[in-house]
Amino acid sequence: MKPFEPEIIAFCCEYCSYAAADLAGSMRLSYPANVKIVKVPCTGRFDIIHALKALEAGADGVFAFGCLEGNCHFEVGNLRAKKRIGYLRCVLDECGIGGERVGMYNMSSAMGTQFAQAAREITEKVRALGPNPVKAARPVNRKPDAKGPGDSATSSTSRLG
């Protein structure tokens, strides 16, 4: 059996953390390939629904990477994201998924080394947590039903008469 490799979604702000990830690549720093980057204009644009949809789709961890606190290009976007991440952690703890699967990092565009280190850190953290419980509970070979709700021979209208 192959070892568990987590799938991690990283929402990176365009101005700082995405540039830091780009710098890490330009510097040829290695970080896990299972960290998938989604560029957003600002982490203030990050919403809880984005993380929930990613977790529902099978991601094992979701992290936001924003500008350094006090240096957001949109003034307080990163502070809004930090607040949302805190709330999301509480919600995931209450649901039994685990709030440790989400988090936030702040960095400037010149922090390529720190981005690579953070990517390694979150990968190890999520690997230790194990697979996303939502993904583990999903049937493996589930095929969507091609028929609509009223197309089935056992629909309520056909049973009635």
Image: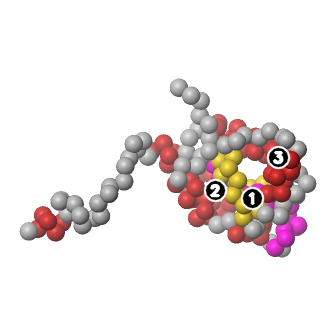
Disc 3: which residue = 25
Q: How is the image coloured?
A: secondary structure
Q: Sequence-wise, which precedes: disc 3 or disc 2?
A: 3
- Along the horizontal axis of the image, is 140 left or right of 64? left
Q: Which residue is mark 1?
A: 12
Kind of residue indicated by mark 2: Arg
Q: Is residue 114 magenta?
A: no
Please report the bounds of the magenta region as a residue range: 61-74
Would residue 46 be found to the left or right of residue 142 on screen?
right
Identity, as a three-letter code, of the amino acid under mark 3? Gly
Q: Secondary structure at mark 1?
A: strand
Can residue 106 be seen in the rendering of this structure? no
Residue at 70% x, 42% y is 33
Residue density around tag 3, few if under 14, some if 14–19, many if 20 or more, within 10 Å: some
Q: Could you tell me which residue is drawn at 66 percent across and 52 percent down?
A: 9
The x, y position of residue 50, in whole percent, is 61, 62
Mark 1 against mark 2, which lies toward the viewer? 1
Q: Nearer the viewer, residue 73 or 83?
A: 73
